Image (cartoon, rainbow, N blue to C red):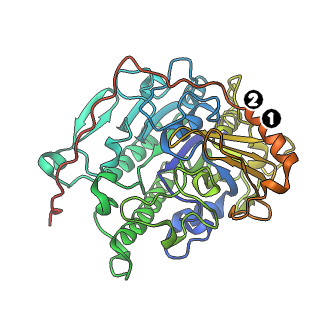
């Protein structure tokens, strides 16, 4: 057992709160996540940094909510040198650092490239749009664009998540004798939006092939079960290389479930009991699964209802790794909760803003949740203790709560001017026409 543990942070893509077994899913099998929850701590009130990819990941990496973070929409905006990431914090105390999968916080030749933000190694997609394609012609390895031979000339032989899993297990193999931070961000179960109702790309529906479900739903289920299997292989690698007891595994998702690729969140109820989906600031868009395991330190099989958010992860991990927490963060460490100890510090409130389809804002204040859909729109108010599905707007009956929320809104966010990079993002590559998979 070490007092400076390895960190494996697994970030699923568009995986809803209710899409896995530990959170009540009954149709989609996730045995490895079931095991992870049984061996660790499951949080029931964990929140993403935002309701879409880039701002959520920015919050995760920098410990700032979307009222203070640099990236507050899904535009291609790079992190800047003054943005301090979790990787930089851990590297500062001797960790080896590797990012695998989808980055989305800066493309090549910008200050937001993962190798400019604390990661020694990177393999995957730099931008969002390229990451839609599960059979890409190329991936990035550090600063080099590497062709995937089986996907050239409209080929569909190399499935990107398989590449990510191999790179992640190789990271464990190569860094097993050093404290390491592995940020593993596969794109499952995000849809390839450009393929319409065929956007749930997976080599096979597997065990769901015979289900009398719509094809997109069969494929979505298969993508989630495949994600689960890949998590299982990572856990196996930790055990094989004898670092399981010295490793904290964190599993979560960047936002709520999507309705892309021909799917519906109603089919599997993968938003759980909550209202809203990806791109909403209702609970279904921002409440996400969070499971944390550290054998022998985090009590096994525990469930925590402590509200936490992505901006809490940086100070939490820093405390567990005995690293210095940067000043000016929005997050609070919940390391005592993970250790099974009493924790008295709480957020006075949580804040989100989202810059697509208007200027949306949300505040959680205790069990009260306020949502504003755009500038000038009235606040909606919900009592999450009595109404977690946000079905009953009780704003009219609670003017004193609305007044407190309005006060918070006046100071929660810095004025935001969309940052402009001096280097334009690379043009998106049109996916090759779909071809039949090899026999």
Q: Tell me what residue is drawn at x 87 percent, y 44 percent.
A: 344
* Percent coordinates x, y for residue 102 in the rendering: 41, 42
Q: Tell me what residue is drawn at x 64 percent, y 32 percent.
A: 67
Image position of 403 (left or right of 205): right
Q: Secondary structure at mark 2?
A: helix
* Quadrant of the frame with the C terminus: bottom left
Closest to the observer: 262 or 28?
A: 262
* Percent coordinates x, y for residue 333 in the rendering: 74, 38
For disc 1, the marked residue is: 407
**Residue 411's disc number:** 2
Closest to the observer: 180 or 411?
A: 411
Closest to the observer: 282 or 9?
A: 282
Q: Tell me what residue is drawn at x 55 percent, y 70 percent.
A: 269
* Percent coordinates x, y for residue 386 in the rendering: 79, 65
Whether pointer 2 and pointer 1 mark residues with C-beta atoms closer than 8 Å, the reply is yes
Q: Mark 1 Cα within 10 Å, few/some/many (few <14, many 20+)? A: few
Image position of 42 (left or right of 249): right
* Quadrant of the frame with the N terminus: top right
Q: Is residue 296 visible?
A: yes
Q: Is residue 346 visible?
A: no
Image position of 114 (left or right of 61): left
Q: How many marks?
A: 2
Closest to the observer: 296 or 97?
A: 97
């Amino acid at each position: 057992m070490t007092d400076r543990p390895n960190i494996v942070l697994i970030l699923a893509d568009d995986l809803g709160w209710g899409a896995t077994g530990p959170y009540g899913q009954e149709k989609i099998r996730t045995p490895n996540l079931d095991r992870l929850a049984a061996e660790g701590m499951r949080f029931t009130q964990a929140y993403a940094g935002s309701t879409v990819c880039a701002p959520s990941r920015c919050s995760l990496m920098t410990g700032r909510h979307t009222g203070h973070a640099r990236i507050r929409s899904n535009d291609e905006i790079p992190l800047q040198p003054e943005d301090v990431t979790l990787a930089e914090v851990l590297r500062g105390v001797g960790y080896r650092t590797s990012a695998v999968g989808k980055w989305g916080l800066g493309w090549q030749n910008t200050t937001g490239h993962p190798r400019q933000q604390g990661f020694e190694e990177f393999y995957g997609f730099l931008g969002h749009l390229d990451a839609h394609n599960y059979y890409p012609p190329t991936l990035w390895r550090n600063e080099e664009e590497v062709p995937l031979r089986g996907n050239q000339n409209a080929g569909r032989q190399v499935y990107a998540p398989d590449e990510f899993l191999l790179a992640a297990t190789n990271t464990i193999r190569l860094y097993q004798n050093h404290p390491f931070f592995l940020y593993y961000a596969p794109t499952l179960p995000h849809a390839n939006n450009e393929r319409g109702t065929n956007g749930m790309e997976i080599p096979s529906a597997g065990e769901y092939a015979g289900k009398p479900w719509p094809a997109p739903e069969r494929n979505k289920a298969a993508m989630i079960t495949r994600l689960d299997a890949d998590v299982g292989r990572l856990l196996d690698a930790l055990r094989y290389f004898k670092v399981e007891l010295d490793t904290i595994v964190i599993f979560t998702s960047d936002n709520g479930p999507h309705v892309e690729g021909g799917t519906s969140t109603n089919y599997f109820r993968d938003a759980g009991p909550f209202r809203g989906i990806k791109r909403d600031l209702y609970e279904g868009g921002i409440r996400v699964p969070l499971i944390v395991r550290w054998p022998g330190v985090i009590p096994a099989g525990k469930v925590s209802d402590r509200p936490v958010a992505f901006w809490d992860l940086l100070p939490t991990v820093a405390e567990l790794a005995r690293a210095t927490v940067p000043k000016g963060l929005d997050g609070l460490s919940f390391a005592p909760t993970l250790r099974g100890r009493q924790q008295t510090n709480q957020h006075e409130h949580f804040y989100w803003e989202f810059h697509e389809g208007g200027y949306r804002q949300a505040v959680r204040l205790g069990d009260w949740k306020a949502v504003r859909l755009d500038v000038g729109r009235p606040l909606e108010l919900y009592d999450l203790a009595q109404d977690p599905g946000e079905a009953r707007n009780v704003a009219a009956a609670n003017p004193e709560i609305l007044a407190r929320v309005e006060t918070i809104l006046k100071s929660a966010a810095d004025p935001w001017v969309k940052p402009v990079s001096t280097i334009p993002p690379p043009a998106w590559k049109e996916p090759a026409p779909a071809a039949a998979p090899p026999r």
